[in-house]
Amino acid sequence: MLKKIGIILIIFVCIITLFACKDDKTKPKGELTSSYDIRATLDVQNQAVYATTKVTLFNDTDSDLSSLAFYLYPNAHSDCRVDIGGVKCDGADLDFCLDGANLTVTLGTPLKSGESGIYIIGTRVGVPNGNDRFALTAEGVYNLHAFFPRLAYYDGGFVIVPYSDRGDPYLFDESDFTVTLEAPLDYIVAHSGVLLKEDLGESSKLTTIQIDGARDVAFSLSKDFKVSSGESGGVKIAYYGEGEQGQEYVDFISTCIVDLSELIGEYPYESFSVSESDFKHGGMEYSGYTLINKDVRDKKLVLLHELLHQWFGLKVGSNGYAEGWLDESLVSYLSYYYMDIYNNGGYAENIQSIKNSYDKFLSRVRAEIGDSYNPKINLSLSEFRNDEEYAYVVYDYGVLIYHGIAEVVGREKLIKGIKGYYQDMKGKVATESDLIKCLEKHGARKMGGIMRSYLEGKVVG
Ligand SMILES: [Zn+2]
């Protein structure tokens, strides 16, 4: 009798398991996963990048897709000539429309839920002179970002983020990238990801890199880079600059990676490389890579800021246009927090100087436009009055928010909350409410209320 019941139970459990498995297998995760295989050539004679971008998509959402949305950022600038050779799928030409930074591809055959598709896009992008993310600098450095079409973030539909010259107006899913870049032999290539191989020809070389789970990739090329390298807990570090201090910066980054992995969570990529140029901003972060201004005043602080973006802004993604403060303010606060540990002090002086600088900014603008001026931080990039307001509010007031929270709940609880935010949100795109929820859950309940008061402008400075 017992045996019989046992057999019936086993059959019942099998049927249940069968149904459970079937359900798990067929239910879409709601994601549109993408991997890129890019073959690009830097043509220095014509100052252009040719690229063939093969994007493999797996539609793990419950809808069929009839079009795809990409960004081709150089086309947002009038001084940059962008040509699209064509878009193909299974040998057939697809219709496309390039409007500013937005490339829309119409699919002849929809990409059905549960199916994969391979799309090949040919592009030629002229590299403008300048000191931006995609430019040939006056000193001969090619900074190459966004020279290929990058799929827009998908969340039940493509989320199209407007381009802005202010801040970092980017929002991407994580993707896997393999990129082969052909460049003249005498150029040294700084890059995202790990080097898979380098093939030397008579006058040119092919550099193949790979990085998985990346928001974006970039390259910098110069004839004059000196390369310093190192390793930290299995993470490959490289510094490409013209100065003599490369090794000192590699050692600094190496220490930071160990300490920050302990403070926040394991460093999320296999490598971290830095390239210096006469770049117009202090720095710009990419997964496993950063551009940095060679003349920036406190280079270690900027390096630390960009390194912290590997955790917040990249591994934990965010909408850089709609919620630019989300990663920038947190990363700025953590830079001062960590510098205090690294230097054995200095935090109080740094916070005081940020307070003074923010107060001066407020007084100056209030004298201009009235005493009721009380800027908000959780605005989209285009909602800030100007670049100055964006910089002071996001980078100074943002630091003061976290400092203010730490004053009430203690630095330990704040860091616990931030660590929990990283653990819960890594690999995803976080929002303001995710941040507040995580700080409350992992740090202290009252942190959400304090954060909200700052965001609503009830606490000034
Ligand atoms: Zn930043």
Image (cartoon, rainbow, N blue to C red):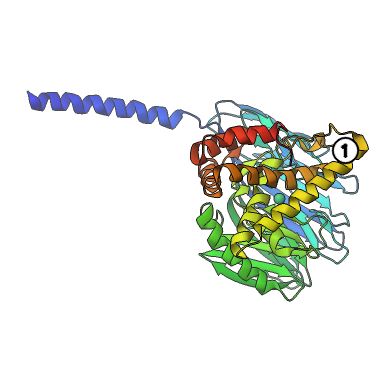
At mark 1, the secondary structure is: helix
Q: Is mark 1 within 8 Å of ligand 1?
A: no
Q: Indicate the quadrant containing the C terminus: top left, top right, bottom left or bottom right.
A: top right
Q: Residue 25 vs residue 340: left or right?
A: left
Residue 202 visible somewhere in the drawing: yes
Name the residue type under label 1: Arg
Q: Residue 364 vs residue 337: left or right?
A: right
User: Residue placed at 66% from the left, 73% from the top?
Assistant: 248
Question: In the orientation shown, which residue stands out farthest toward the left?
Answer: 1
User: Residue placed at 38% from the left, 28% from the top?
Assistant: 22
Please tell me whether residue 426 is drawn above or below residue 440 in the rendered image: below
Residue 165 visible somewhere in the drawing: no
The spot of residue 366 in percent (x, y) is 87, 38
Mark 1 sits on what residue?
Answer: 366
Q: Which of 209 and 430 is in front in this view?
A: 430
Please tell me whether residue 80 is drawn above or below residue 381 in the rendered image: below
Q: How many marks?
A: 1
The spot of residue 270 in percent (x, y) is 55, 59
Residue 168 occupies quadrant: top right
User: Residue placed at 74% from the left, 73% from the top?
Assistant: 202
Question: In the orientation shown, which residue stands out farthest toward the bottom?
Answer: 244
Q: Nearer the viewer, residue 331 or 149?
A: 331
The spot of residue 125 in percent (x, y) is 82, 50
User: Residue placed at 67% from the left, 31% from the top?
Assistant: 158
Please tell me whether residue 143 is drawn above or below residue 114 in the rendered image: below
Q: Residue 136 vs residue 156: left or right?
A: right
